[in-house]
């Protein structure tokens, strides 16, 4: 009986785990996409068996004189388990 209760407890605990990947993996993906990270924010965190975390990474970019020539200065990166992937480039915060 104790074994059954332990198995149920472990199954319930494992079902609410977030993604295992952390900021080190997110920084690595950002650097691979030519984005030296300045700030990493958690945008969305889904719990469960297939937990997924969305990160918004703000990049350090050189100054540009023309506003139209300015590239997108943020990335959205999704992590599921311990695997991370680039979802899309994004526009950074306005000052």
Image (cartoon, rainbow, N blue to C red):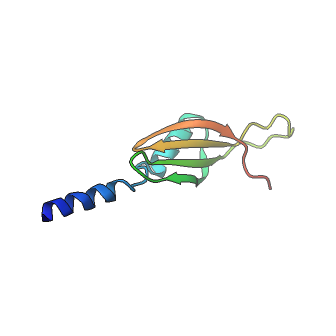
Query: Image point 63% across, 42% down: which residue?
Result: 75
What is the total number of numbered labels drawn onto the structure image? 0
**Residue 23 at x, y = what percent?**
48, 51
Above or below, comparing residue 69 to residue 6 in the picture: above
The picture places residue 62, in percent across and down from the top left corner, at 73, 42
| Residue 9 placement: quadrant | bottom left
Q: Is residue 35 above or below residue 58?
A: above
Left or right: residue 77 compared with residue 14 = right
**The one of 94 and 18 positioned closer to us in this rendering:** 18
Q: Is residue 69 above or below residue 91?
A: above
Instruction: Please state which of residues 9 and 84 is positioned toward the viewer in this rendering.
Output: 9
Give me the residue at 51% from left, 36% from top.
85
In this picture, residue 69 sits left or right of residue 43? right
Tell me the quarter of the image containing the N terminus: bottom left
Which residue appears farthest toward the front when viewing the image?
A: 1
Q: Position of residue 45 (x, y in %)?
A: 52, 53
Which residue lies at the image location 43% right of the left edge and 49% below the top edge? 19
In this image, 1 relative to 85: left or right? Answer: left
Q: Residue at x 66, y 46 (%)?
A: 60
Q: Is residue 61 left or right of residue 55?
A: right
| Image quadrant in which the C terminus is located | bottom right
The correct choice, above or below, for 41 with respect to 50 in the image is below
């Amino acid at each position: 009986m104790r074994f059954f209760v332990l198995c149920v407890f472990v199954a319930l605990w494992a079902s609410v785990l977030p993604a295992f990947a952390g900021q080190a993996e997110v920084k690595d993906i950002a650097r691979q996409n030519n984005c030296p990270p300045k700030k990493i924010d958690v945008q969305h965190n889904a719990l469960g068996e297939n937990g997924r975390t969305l990160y918004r990474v703000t990049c350090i970019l050189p100054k540009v004189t023309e506003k139209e020539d300015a590239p997108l200065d943020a990335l959205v990166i999704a992590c599921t388990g311990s695997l991370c992937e680039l979802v899309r480039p994004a526009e950074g915060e306005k000052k």
